[in-house]
Image (cartoon, coloured by chain):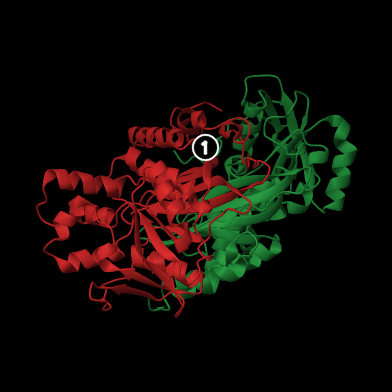
Chain colours: A red, B green
Amino acid sequence: MSDLPDTEFSLIRRLFAPLSDEAHGFGLRDDVALVPPSEPGKQSCVTKDMIVAGVHFLPDDPPDLIARKLIRVNVSDLVAKGAVPDSCLLAAAFNSDRDIAWIEAFAAGLAEDLETYGMALIGGDTVRTPGPDTFSLTAFGHVGRRTIVLRSGAQAGDNLYVTGTIGDAGLGLKILRGDLGTVALGIRTRLEERYRLPQPRAEFGRALSNFATAALDVSDGLVADASHMAEASGLAARIEFDRVPLSSSATRLVKKDKALHLSLLGAGDDYEILFAAPASASDAIAAASGQADTPLTRIGQLVSGTPGDVTVLDTDGAALDLPTPGYRHF
Amino acid sequence: MSDLPDTEFSLIRRLFAPLSDEAHGFGLRDDVALVPPSEPGKQSCVTKDMIVAGVHFLPDDPPDLIARKLIRVNVSDLVAKGAVPDSCLLAAAFNSDRDIAWIEAFAAGLAEDLETYGMALIGGDTVRTPGPDTFSLTAFGHVGRRTIVLRSGAQAGDNLYVTGTIGDAGLGLKILRGDLGTVALGIRTRLEERYRLPQPRAEFGRALSNFATAALDVSDGLVADASHMAEASGLAARIEFDRVPLSSSATRLVKKDKALHLSLLGAGDDYEILFAAPASASDAIAAASGQADTPLTRIGQLVSGTPGDVTVLDTDGAALDLPTPGYRHF
């Protein structure tokens, strides 16, 4: 069989095989990979997120950033459980109109962030689609046998914390869609970047199992994800609206727009870590925040109540009405 | 948060969570799953295939058969390596127009074949897409540490075998597309079924590591997949055209059409196992074929030569010209 430069196989060999390893990925020359075994006392965990052009990213986003976002949304799931990323498999359906240069740029972005997170590409599938580009990553990590932090471990009375700032990615998406009119260049750049290139809290995630009773990454929206955690833990949650941390850019934009401010609690894509921890852990939490150089804010509490109920309280203690709790596909 | 009947979360809870387990999939209530650990002396392997409506299946195929095909193309990859399927993660992008009844039927098909192959659904992602339905499965299996059968182990002089029959699925697709005109109902039904519902050789796969030096499933086409194996093994392959096994239905259709007959060597989707084994293994192979009730045919040999070269020989020993070697996405 002749070796045309544009076949699926030569593309995999040229662009993706260099991102693999021999021990587990067989250099992408086989149909299966071996799951990298965990060290003694650890176990392998796995996550799988899918992103679709026009739904999870914009079709004209730079291809390298799309690839990096794909890796990061999966890394975010792992690190929010206290796991350390390890390897991944990629299923890529490239739209038929994407040329090789586009796919090369995608592969370059993939290479960059596999390096960032110390991961090997051990397998996958590459196809063409008449529809929007669609990518599914399966990412493996290692976590201590007793230290995986699930959604379900929170206790009534635990404090609720979030890393970084909330709402930047949602505002970035609104700006990219032209929904916010003219926005100063500096603010625009920072917020768009937050949407296009999530920054999973990998460093802070390593400390998570020392104090967190429950955790997950904020991808559907702060209130929606707080609800997921509360529901899995059989609890309700209370969030104090004025404690929800905003970046200076976001603060500028929502200053005169309460509705926009409220909407940030339902905006997705922040990829911060939301976690619950007992009050007794506050010193350990502060130390971890400092060591990982990760800003951290206590925003509320887990309480007894209807599982999954989230109440957002205004400064006067009154419950706020929220526009939408979070992104919904269905 | 109110619990609308049509959210992603309630859909997952109602349709997909019952297919999960607690020990590794956490009932689909978390963002990660634990990879089921392998028994002593075994290791976990993983594969990931993606299927797209209009590319790998027809958009109006019955949804339960689409789900079952998705599972089976992945199971096929595992069993062709000597692995036993174990669990999986599903990333599903349903077209926005698919209603809940369609998704329910898809989930029912998934349930049926997870049961068939003894697998649990331990995680994944469910989204909507404006494009064609796109599904990616990540499937885990267990395989003995020294018994995984790769593409790369064939030796010069090894015989080349294939299970079952070749070309049925390709003919089924041609019939479904109306490319073959009127076809007798019995033949039509059998061949369409071969396209829509692959029958991975799970039983035979369990014996594979006893004799096979190299193996893979026939998904791209017989010649293309023989080429993959030969290339990975640094060898060439010879296939005797009149030894390639056809079903009685296929035989009827190609009887007066040599071009159609030849095209079957490039038709994909058969999901039979193609493997190499030394001549000394022929007794063990015959025994395994009998035990697994799996028809088996010796169709050629691996030989020294340009790696990946496949020659198809006519009865008079002359090399045949083939139309296309196999399905290409790019």
The amino acid type of the residue labelled 1 equals: Leu
Residue A277 in sight in this render: no
Residue drawn at the location 71% of the way across and 61% of the way down: B118
Position of residue B76 relative to residue A105, above or below, is below
Viewer-proximal residue among B184 and B212: B212
Percent of width and height locating residue A324: 29, 71
B260 sits left or right of A192 in the view: right
A122 sits left or right of A236 in the view: right
Query: What chain letter is assigned to the residue under label 1?
Result: A
Residue B221 in sight in this render: yes
Percent of width and height locating residue A214: 49, 61
Residue drawn at the location 13% of the way across and 65% of the way down: A257
Q: Quadrant of residue B216?
A: top right
Percent of width and height locating residue B137: 55, 54
Residue at the outermost top position: B305
Residue assigned mark 1: A121
Percent of width and height locating residue B45: 66, 44
Residue drawn at the location 30% of the way across and 68% of the way down: A240
Q: Secondary structure under badge 1?
A: strand
Mark 1 surroundings within 10 Å by alpha-carbon count, few (fewer than 14), some (14 through 19), many (20 or more):
many
Viewer-proximal residue among B231 and A26: A26
Q: Quadrant of residue A276?
A: bottom left
B187 sits left or right of A128 in the view: right
Question: Which quarter shows the N terminus of chain A?
Answer: top right
Position of residue B309 relative to residue B94, above or below, is above
Position of residue B8 relative to residue B43, above or below, is below
Q: How many marks?
A: 1
Question: Which quarter shows the C terminus of chain A?
Answer: bottom left
Viewer-proximal residue among A63 and A141: A141
